[in-house]
């Protein structure tokens, strides 16, 4: 039931009198009393002065303190103009607000907003209130709230958080949150510890720690400034600096001396030249004809004449800034006054850099193994067609592309990404196996032992397959989406991590290595393939059909390339040019490893993967240069070991 305006006014007056006469004398009994004591500051709402009010509320010890701060931060605090009292308010409509008493929580009813002001703290004040709320949130029953409080401290730490954090650890029931609190306490102690001994102990506790937060806490401890002085200055001196390095250039050092009045301000050569041009009068500068100013000495005399006349600043010919700065002393002085703290910080950062270096080497090794598995998966099919059969198949990359597009088509039909990948792998093998058999029957079989014609024919087929893919799928990259369980990465620490897709590809490469070895060593096709590889004529005399074996072997190599395409498409862009990105590396893998041996292919893929990642580590901003250096290295490698890592055998060796 809505109250009339007179009734509302009487109720407001009664409440005001009640609050005034019933207000306790101690701030420990009424949060309203605390608010009234800081009423002017709250009304002014200035970030420069509001801190006292925020701290008073937070430190009042009253159970309502947290609620008041939350209401204030959310812009739900209202003040009544008539008596200046503060309330929590809920807007009913544009003209009416429901008020609640802060101390009792009582619903005071609905009031017109004519006599009410809504407190709207700006972002800076809300941040201050948020920092004050942290001490309450650290002890909140909800674990999520406690974690949010730790995140808030990490974003904007303050000295006051140290005591609140230390007091909340003992009663923390969650072991993980307790460990996070203890870590945060040590981080805060680095900056805000009461004694140098406590800070040093906290700093040394992080030796070898890879956390970015640790480096973020230690780096400010080692901030420094450069001081110009005749003797080592007072304070925590890091070292004496010789001008000329990256930390202090000669020009910057001389500028410091000029500012300190310890050296003259010498105009530069360009400045002197500009002055001479501006002071040409009747064909002369400083009494010297312009025609005679062809030498540096003559120009210096002209400038000296202008300086003697007071027209330009003085200049000393032959003055050397390098010699001038050598006569002065420059020192790097830490902003942190305690040498024990800075020494501990330097020691800890050195240990962290060592640990980071070791983990970077491990991360680089994982990246190299991941890349090697991709190259091996792409090259294992080529190891069969080129290494075993001796066929230079320039369309091998297009079989990889066909496999990737097969996976894309399957995902358009089967929306379940896990099921679609499971179906795509055998289907990609079947499609590219059939394409390989067709290519071998129609083209390759007529070109055996004619490598140049085979290269040209397969290169033409490569171009044709790319154009067919463009006509069917267009030039836009098509997504091959990985299942949810392959999203993300296995993060070992802040330095070492590898994506689950890379791990899956690595596992797939090992699986197909095992399948290849099983086929070649345990099946009739493998036995016949090895027989035909050693001597096709002798195999034929033993009842083996070399023509059939060549067809199936070429189809097997093409089918494995299709499976590689599905795997590669999970993290690479699926386009008609996908195969071209891997054909060169595939040939290099087979050739470097040793043609005709799968173990050589594995060794070649490992060598190239580590080589490429190593070169990229030295030159991370230029991957094209890394590939160029890699090719040059491989060319040199082949010059010294033309048969590759594993010696060439079989039909290709005889050729």
Image (spheres, helix red, strand yellow):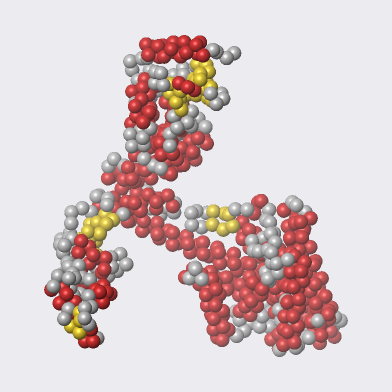
Instruction: Please state, as top left, top right, bottom left or bottom right, where the C terminus lies in the image.
Output: bottom right
Residue at image coords 43%, 23%: 79
Q: Is residue 280 left or right of residue 190?
A: left
Front-most of residues 210 and 281:
281
Residue at image coords 73%, 77%: 463
Q: Residue furthest front?
A: 282
Front-most of residues 254 and 545:
254
Front-most of residues 651 and 571:
571
Image position, residue 304 (x, y; %): 16, 76
Image position, residue 272 (x, y; %): 24, 74
Asked whether residue 558 is in view, the answer is no
Image position, residue 392 (x, y; %): 71, 81
In this rendering, the count of numbered labels is 0
Quarter of image, res 267: bottom left
Residue at image coords 70%, 69%: 576
Residue at image coords 67%, 60%: 570
Q: Which residue lies furthest to the left in this view?
A: 308
Quarter of image, res 30: top left
Q: In this view, does 263 lie to the left or right of 400?
A: left
In the displayed structure, would residue 109 be above or below residue 408? above
In the displayed structure, would residue 496 be above or below residue 607? above
Instruction: Please state, as top left, top right, bottom left or bottom right, where the N terminus lies in the image.
Output: top right
Quarter of image, res 375: bottom right
Q: Which residue lies furthest to the right in this view?
A: 543
Image position, residue 327 (x, y; %): 16, 69
Asked whether residue 474 is in view, the answer is yes
In the displayed structure, would residue 449 be above or below residue 188? below
């Amino acid at each position: 039931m809505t109250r009339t305006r007179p009734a509302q006014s009487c109720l407001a007056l009664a409440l005001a009198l009640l609050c005034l006469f019933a207000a306790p004398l101690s701030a420990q009994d009424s949060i309203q009393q605390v608010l009234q004591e800081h009423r002017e500051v709250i009304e002014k709402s200035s970030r420069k002065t509001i801190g006292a009010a925020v701290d008073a509320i937070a430190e009042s010890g009253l159970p309502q303190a947290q609620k008041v701060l939350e209401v204030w931060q959310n812009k739900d605090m209202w003040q009544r103009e008539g008596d200046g009292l503060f309330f929590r308010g809920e807007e009913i409509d544009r003209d009416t607000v429901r008020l609640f008493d802060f101390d009792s929580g009582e619903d005071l009813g609905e009031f017109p907003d004519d006599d009410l002001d809504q407190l709207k703290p700006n972002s800076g004040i809300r941040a201050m209130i948020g920092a004050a709320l942290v001490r309450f949130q650290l002890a909140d029953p909800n674990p999520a709230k406690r974690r949010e409080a730790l995140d808030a401290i990490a974003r904007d730490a303050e000295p006051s958080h140290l005591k609140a954090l230390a007091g909340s650890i003992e009663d923390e029931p969650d072991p993980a949150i307790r460990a996070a609190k203890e870590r945060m306490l040590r981080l805060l102690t680095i900056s805000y510890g009461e004694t140098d001994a406590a800070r040093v102990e906290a700093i040394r506790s992080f030796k070898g720690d890879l956390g970015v937060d640790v480096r973020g806490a230690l780096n400010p401890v080692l901030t420094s400034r450069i001081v110009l002085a005749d003797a080592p200055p007072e304070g925590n001196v890091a070292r004496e600096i010789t001008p000329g390095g990256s930390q202090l250039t000669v020009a910057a050092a001389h500028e410091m001396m000029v500012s300190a009045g310890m050296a003259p301000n010498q105009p530069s050569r360009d400045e002197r030249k500009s002055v001479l041009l501006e002071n040409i009068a009747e064909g002369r500068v400083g009494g010297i004809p312009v025609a005679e100013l062809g030498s540096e000495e003559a120009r210096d005399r002209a400038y000296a004449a202008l300086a003697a006349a007071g027209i330009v600043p003085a200049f000393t010919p032959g003055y050397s800034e390098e010699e001038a700065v050598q006569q002065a002393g420059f020192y790097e002085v830490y902003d942190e006054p305690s040498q024990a703290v800075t020494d501990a910080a330097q020691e800890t950062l050195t240990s962290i850099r060592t640990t980071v270096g070791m983990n970077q080497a491990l991360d680089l090794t994982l990246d190299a193994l991941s890349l090697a598995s991709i190259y091996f998966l792409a090259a294992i099919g080529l190891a069969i067609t080129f290494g075993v059969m001796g066929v230079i198949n320039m369309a091998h990359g297009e079989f990889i592309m066909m496999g990737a597009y097969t996976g894309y088509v399957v995902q358009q039909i089967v929306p379940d990404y896990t099921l679609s990948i499971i179906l795509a792998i055998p289907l990609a093998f079947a499609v590219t196996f059939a394409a390989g058999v067709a290519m071998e029957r129609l083209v390759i079989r007529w070109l055996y032992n004619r490598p140049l014609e085979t290269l040209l024919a397969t290169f033409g087929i490569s171009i044709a397959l790319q154009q067919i893919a463009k006509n069917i799928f267009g030039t836009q990259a098509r997504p091959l989406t990985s299942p949810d369980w392959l999203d993300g990465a296995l993060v070992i620490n802040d330095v070492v991590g590898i994506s689950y897709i890379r791990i899956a590809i690595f596992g797939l490469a090992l699986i197909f290595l095992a399948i290849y070895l099983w086929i070649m060593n345990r099946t009739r096709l493998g036995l016949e393939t090895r027989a035909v590889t050693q001597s096709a004529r002798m195999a034929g005399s033993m009842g083996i059909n070399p023509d059939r074996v060549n067809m199936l072997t070429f189809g097997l190599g093409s089918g494995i390339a299709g499976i590689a395409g599905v795997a590669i498409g999970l993290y690479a862009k699926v386009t008609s040019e996908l195969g071209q990105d891997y054909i060169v590396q595939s040939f290099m893998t087979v050739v470097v490893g040793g043609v005709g041996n799968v173990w050589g292919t594995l060794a070649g893929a490992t060598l190239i993967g580590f080589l490429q990642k190593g070169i990229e580590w030295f030159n991370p901003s230029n991957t094209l240069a890394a590939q160029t250096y890699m090719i040059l290295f491989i060319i040199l490698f082949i010059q010294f070991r033309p048969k590759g890592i594993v010696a060439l055998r079989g039909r290709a060796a005889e050729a």
